[in-house]
Image (spheres, rainbow, N blue to C red):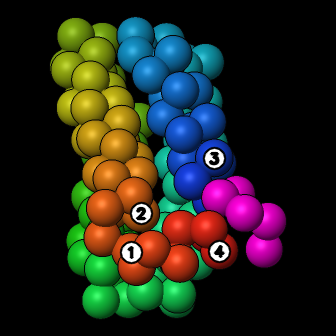
């Protein structure tokens, strides 16, 4: 695997997610796409180091999916905006935490292989 490729992907996803902070139908689709990409990365990280990434790979992803579904199913636009903000906050925080875990909790030689 290319040096730091997962870390770079996560940083790119975080930037893209931060750019979609205001609810629109387009931003919701963008955020869902980012969440799917993030899930695949977390799944890979969990396979490499489950003792660090298991909680994110299970509970964190389930929470993200639930927040996405709640946003999508809500009819009232004001409620939808509120649910979207919650979804956006949780996703950007999750990506940032994952970046932090990679930088701070993996052994020195692991980040270069991630």
Mark-to-mark CA distance, 1 and 2 = 6 Å
Question: Which residue appears at 40% of the width and 79% of the height?
Answer: 107
The C terminus is located in which quarter? Answer: bottom right
Pointers 1 and 2 in contact (C-beta within 8 Å): yes
Indicate the secondary structure of the residue bearing disc 4.
helix
Residue that label 4 marks? 113
Coordinates of residue 91 in the picture (x, y in percent): 36, 42
Residue that label 3 marks? 8
Coordinates of residue 66 in the picture (x, y in percent): 30, 54
Bounds of the magenta segment: 1-5
Pointers 2 and 3 in contact (C-beta within 8 Å): no
Pointers 1 and 4 in contact (C-beta within 8 Å): no
Chief secondary structure of the magenta portion: loop
Coordinates of residue 80 in the picture (x, y in percent): 29, 22
Mark-to-mark CA distance, 2 and 4 = 11 Å
Q: Mark 3 vs mark 1: which is more N-terminal?
A: 3
Dot 2: few (<14), some (14–19), or many (≥20) neighbours within 10 Å? many
Q: Is residue 8 left or right of residue 92?
A: right
In the displayed structure, 102 sits above or below 48; it is above
Which residue in the rendered view is the most extreme toward the right? 2
Pointers 2 and 4 in contact (C-beta within 8 Å): no
Q: Mark 3 vs mark 4: which is more N-terminal?
A: 3
Q: Is residue 97 left or right of residue 108?
A: left
Mark-to-mark CA distance, 3 and 1 = 16 Å
Of badges 3 and 4, the one in the foreground is 4
Residue that label 1 marks? 106
Q: Quadrant of residue 73?
A: top left
* 69 and 91: which is toward the camera: 91
Residue that label 2 marks? 102
Indicate the secondary structure of the residue bearing disc 1.
loop
Mark-to-mark CA distance, 2 and 3 = 11 Å
């Amino acid at each position: 695997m290319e040096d730091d490729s997962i870390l770079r992907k996560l940083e790119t996803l975080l930037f893209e997610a931060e750019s979609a902070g205001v609810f629109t139908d387009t931003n919701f689709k963008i955020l869902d796409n980012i969440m799917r990409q993030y899930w695949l990365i977390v799944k890979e990280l969990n396979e490499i180091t489950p003792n660090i990434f298991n909680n994110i790979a299970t509970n964190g992803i389930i929470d993200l999916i639930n927040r996405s579904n709640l946003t999508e199913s809500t009819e009232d636009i004001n409620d939808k905006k509120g649910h979207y903000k919650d979804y956006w906050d949780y996703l950007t925080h999750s990506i940032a935490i994952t970046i932090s875990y990679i930088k701070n909790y993996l052994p020195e030689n692991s980040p270069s292989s991630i």
